[in-house]
């Protein structure tokens, strides 16, 4: 291992963890960025608090500044808040998993893009999903609104419900469902009227239509330019009507899109689609990471930190491989390794640096590593004193009991870990003598 790398690691140890002051300073910058992106104040506050908790005490990544590292943590929290977490994958896009005709109700303030989005959705469902779509405008408040939808329907090559003057939104909705059932439509998109501000009578009207048609999706359409009002709008629609998803329009403009975060935070409903222009094909799938970096406006820093983190993992892996080869493997190293296995790939990376271990990597890929055990083992090691980690021989019954209690595990688990570690270090010491074949067998057994 080169001396230069050692220097890097020394610096890392000296720097240790992100301090409260580091984090507070960086978060000040982040707060401004989020507010500039029109994320609603209470949402900013929540996010900043969450990040503070997560960031303080986190191990620093050398070669980037604490501020940069905090920004990366913010970015990850943003992605998560926008629905990038596990379990959210199936919630993007429109859910049509219901008996036909599936009603979709479009709600939102006037000018948010409901009618345009209705046309876009119709086009997408017809072309991509091969669905038979009926468009119906329930907007009797604005002259020409129904004609606007009919025009879009023609462009999208789908049918729109014939206009009958004098009908109420409820009557139109019932007629649409009726026609759809009789003529075997797959999907009915119900486009509603909106007001410039939240309006009780109108909310009530939409709520009634919702009750009567029981839509499978109620999509709240929001203009990305909506600023701090986004929260109030979302809250009102969620409380009075109930929404299942959000469509954010006008992301082709220069708004940073903080409204997406506010809406998602307040309603808990997933963001399903994005409107990216006036044309009917300007409808995009939602990618939390893209919007996150747009909201934060610090994409360069995020990728810088990602790169640095990847390099450090690499450097750490090289160092570990060298120590393994010299037979200087300690419990500390083992704990580090466990941490990296959590991120997966790293153990393979380490092994990949030893000659001739292609096969072991494959076997590791195949083996289903139970990460909860790994987490418990890491907890056991962190409950040890530094001296215990260096010289595990001193671990007798009373110390083991203390460690088990401290890590929320049992003495048996502590014993098991020690046995595994013993096997592993013995295997590593033999490594040079026996050669790679022995490593492969012993290595896998120890795992
Ligand atoms: P509604 O009142 O909610 O039905 O809104 P409309 O669908 O009538 O849209 C209002 C205006 O916004 C129209 O001029 C649309 O062309 C425009 N619009 C809708 N969605 C988008 C979008 O994603 N990007 C852009 N640039 N304009 C949009
Ligand atoms: Mg409209």
Image (spheres, rainbow, N blue to C red):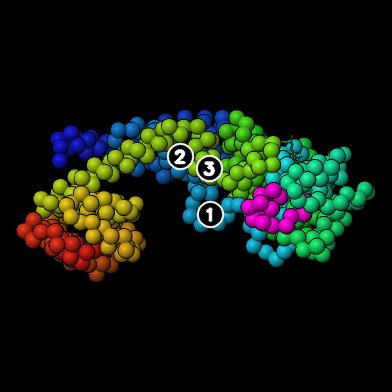
Which of pointers 3 and 2 indicates the residue nearer the eye?
A: 2
Q: Earlier in the sequence, mark 2 or mark 1?
A: 2
Residue 263, given in percent of the width and then of the height, sits at 62, 44
Magenta extent: 121-136
- Rounded to the nearest angstrom, the CA distance separating label 1 from label 3 is 20 Å
Residue at label 2?
74
**Observer-nearest residue: 220 or 278?**
278
Report the image quarter containing ligand 2.
top right
| Residue 244 appears in the rendering | no
Residue at label 1?
88
Classify residue 74 as left or right of residue 376: right
Q: Earlier in the sequence, mark 1 or mark 3?
A: 3
Against 442, residue 31 (above or below) is above
Residue 405, given in percent of the width and then of the height, sits at 29, 62
Residue at 67% from the left image edge and 64% from the top image edge: 98
Against 439, residue 313 (above or below) is above
**Observer-nearest residue: 399 or 153?**
153
């Amino acid at each position: 291992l080169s001396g230069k790398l050692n220097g890097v690691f020394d610096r890392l140890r000296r720097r240790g963890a992100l301090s409260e002051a580091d984090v507070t300073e960086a978060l000040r910058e982040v707060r401004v960025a989020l507010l500039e992106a029109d994320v609603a104040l209470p949402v900013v506050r929540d996010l900043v608090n969450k990040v503070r908790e997560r960031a303080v005490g986190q191990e620093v990544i050398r070669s980037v500044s604490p501020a940069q590292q905090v920004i990366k943590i913010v970015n990850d929290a943003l992605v998560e808040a926008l629905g990038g977490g596990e379990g959210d994958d199936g919630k993007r896009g429109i859910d049509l998993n219901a008996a036909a005709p599936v009603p979709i109700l479009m709600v939102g303030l006037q000018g948010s893009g409901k009618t345009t989005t209705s046309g876009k959705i119709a086009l997408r469902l017809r072309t991509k999903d091969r669905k038979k779509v009926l468009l119906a405008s329930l907007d009797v408040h604005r002259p020409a609104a129904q004609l606007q939808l009919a025009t879009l329907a023609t462009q999208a090559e789908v049918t729109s419900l014939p206009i009958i003057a004098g009908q109420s939104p409820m009557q139109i909705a019932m007629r649409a469902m009726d026609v759809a059932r009789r003529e075997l439509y797959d999907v009915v998109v119900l486009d509603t009227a909106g007001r410039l501000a939240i309006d009780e009578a109108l909310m009530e009207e939409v709520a009634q239509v919702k009750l009567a048609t029981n839509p499978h999706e109620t999509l709240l359409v929001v203009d990305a330019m909506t600023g701090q009002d986004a929260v109030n709008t979302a809250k009102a629609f969620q409380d009075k009507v109930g929404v299942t998803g959000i469509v954010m329009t006008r992301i082709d403009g220069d708004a940073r899109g903080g409204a997406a975060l506010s809406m998602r935070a307040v309603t808990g409903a997933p963001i399903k689609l994005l409107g990216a222009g006036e044309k009917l094909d300007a409808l995009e799938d939602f990618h939390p990471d893209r919007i996150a970096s747009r909201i934060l406006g610090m994409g360069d820093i995020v990728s810088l930190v990602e790169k640095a983190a990847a390099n450090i993992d690499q450097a750490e892996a090289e160092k570990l491989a060298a120590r393994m080869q010299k037979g200087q493997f300690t419990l500390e190293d083992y704990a580090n390794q466990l941490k990296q296995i959590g991120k997966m790939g790293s153990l393979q990376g380490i092994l990949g640096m030893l000659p001739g271990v292609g096969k072991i990597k494959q076997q590791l890929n195949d083996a289903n590593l139970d990460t909860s055990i790994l987490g418990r083992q890491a907890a056991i090691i962190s409950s040890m004193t530094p001296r215990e980690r260096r010289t595990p021989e001193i671990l007798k019954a009373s110390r083991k009991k203390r460690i088990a209690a401290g890590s929320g595990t049992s003495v048996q688990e502590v014993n098991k870990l020690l046995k595994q570690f013993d096997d592993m270090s013995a295997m590593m010491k033999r490594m040079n003598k026996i050669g790679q074949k022995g490593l492969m067998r012993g290595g896998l057994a120890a795992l």
